[in-house]
Image (cartoon, coloured by chain):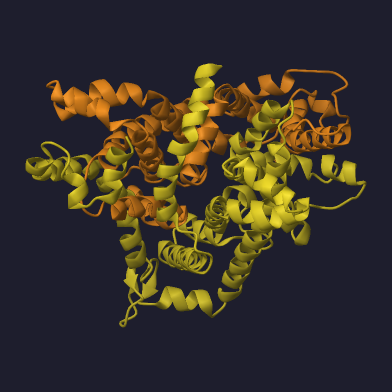
Chain colours: A orange, B yellow
Amino acid sequence: MTGSPLKRTLSSLGFAAVAVYCLAPFYWMVVSAFRRPQDQFDNSPVPARWSSENFSAVFSGDNGFGRALLNSVVVAGTTTVLTLLIGTFTAYALARLDFRFKNAVLGLIVATTMFPGISQLVPLLKLFTEIKWINTYQAMVLPSLGFALPLSVWLLTAFFRQLPFELEQAAMVDGCTRGQAFRKIIVPLAAPGLFTTAILTFIAAWNEFLIALSMVNKKEMQTATVAISKFTGVSGFDQPFGTQMAAGAIVTVPLIAVVLVFQRRIVAGLTAGGVK
Amino acid sequence: MTTTESAPAAGTAAARAPRGRARGDVQGTRRLAALLLSPTLLVLALVIGYPVLAGFRESLYSRGEGLDADGFVVEGDRFVGLGNYTAIFQGDRADAFWNAFSNTTFFTLTTVVLETVIGVAMALIMQQAFRGRALVRASILVPWAIPTAISGLLWRWIFQADGAANAVLRQEILWTADGFPAKTAVVIAEVWKTSPFIGLLVLAGLQMIPRDVYEAARVDGAGPVQQFFRITLPLVKPALLVAVLFRMLDVLRMFDLPAVLIGVNQKSVETLTMIAWFEASNLRYGSAAAYATVLFLYIALIAYLFVKLLGADIIGEARQKNRRPRAVRTPRGGRRAAA
């Protein structure tokens, strides 16, 4: 398996190629964020002089970036909590109970993930305008649920099925009700799966753009991804790339840190679900 | 353990019988199942089911001012039948539709082919069990984790007239202006973001292939190329097909990346989602809904053809997936416990 030195070198080269491919654009974002605004168009791989001016520019002025971050946390957080709460029950039923049309229900739920977001958005946009929900959190959370829920039901069903049935049955023989067995046996055992689903849901909701862009036209309600894409420069004409790269780094780096820490879990989740 | 676990999958009366109280409990189980399923189904009915129907109804109406038979101005929704659809396919808006349609199809074909090739290559590289593997596996998640809108900005920056791309290529291409370079920029950015993901899924598929299959092939005199096409590819096909299908359906509804990288209402990169979004944001809900419905049908058709022709069975895959991890997870869990 260790192979010849040549093979070793080749595969190290391959590894390096993959790493460079994945990381180079991200590196460019971080480096550009740390340049001084006057060096913005300098293409040297390392900034001549490091500066945090872009980062202070993100939070200053009328960008309202702090508020946008808060909005993102609220929307993505609420979506995640609701998805887990509702999805867990459904996944439990799909993984543990016997009833007719079970595969049909699962198939239907999985099929909804293929649904194009815009078809959902147009009628909801009209409806929410009529009931004056535009520029509210619920107008962003509800449509997001439509995409987060099917995926997490699918994932959680896969996770629940891996747990041995005997434990639950033993608990029920010992006098637990089904509900108690679920709460005291299944939920603690499924905690890693729940956690994985939570991370994946949160990342997907945090990255959401189309819904947030459509349902909100007030600046105070924009989520971070939308706010950054709308940053304006001093003159209003040139793209404030330095500021945008700094804001992009602020939004992305914590996410990447979480992804790296929970790498194993996320890979398990992605390959179990088979979808993004 | 095997018998109890396969029971629900089989779902037959015979399989249900061994469970002690199961017989008397059937009614209760059904009621419980209905109770547990209803919140999800309710949410999906509200945010997916309702929009499908309302969107179709909406697409038959037109909003705005018109004159009625007596010459009075009428405001509000007017029933126009299939008027919105005919307006899509013919008349002065037809060009815009066919442009968006061909852009969408172009992006789907090019990105899916490129990211499949690159993704499979990445998976083959990562499968080599050498040091540094953890690092590569971690870095592969970085493009996936960056929000698409942010990666659109990032690539817009790279593709600036005097940006990094032109500096590296020593060219002066106006990437983000209109035209073919804009399309190329979108394809490059999309492929960068998504091929690691295909790589990840294919890698998972590769790791399920037992090593002795390769040893047997080597003994029989198969070279590396033959091994790849005769063993690796067929065995990894189910995982790859599902990954490709989901990627395809995802590109077909692409919005964030071209919208941020190039801009909305730009002829060179306008996709079907973008044109529908543009109509909706101009309050022309009827025609927006018509575009969305056409896109919906297009996606459904592609999914249907893909599943029919290539046999990528999502639900079957779901069922398989549920069975498969069990076989795979056990050794992995064992390894983790040992570590």
- Most distant residue in the right direction: B170
- Residue B112 lies left or right of residue A5; in this view the side is left
For the point 80% across and 23% down, which residue is it?
A36
Q: Position of residue A274 (x, y in %)?
A: 50, 45
Q: In which quadrant will I find the C terminus of chain B? A: top right
Q: Position of residue B331 (x, y in %)?
A: 51, 30
The answer to which quarter of the image holds residue A18 is top right
For the point 24% across and 50% down, which residue is it?
B11
- Residue A101 lies left or right of residue A242; in this view the side is left
For the point 47% across and 25% down, which residue is it?
A70
Any part of residue A168 in sight: yes
- Residue A190 lies left or right of residue B140; in this view the side is left
- Most distant residue in the bottom direction: B69
In this rendering, the answer to whether B257 lies above or below A182 is below
Q: Position of residue B329 (x, y in %)?
A: 48, 33
Q: In which quadrant will I find the N terminus of chain B? A: top left
Any part of residue A218 in sight: no
Q: Position of residue A143 (x, y in %)?
A: 38, 45
Q: Choose between B244 and B151: the one closer to the eye.
A: B244
- Most distant residue in the left direction: B24
The answer to which quarter of the image holds residue A57 is top right
Q: Choose between B188 and B149: the one closer to the eye.
A: B188
Total numbered circles = 0
In this rendering, the answer to whether A49 lies above or below B269 is above
In this rendering, the answer to whether A211 lies above or below B96 is above
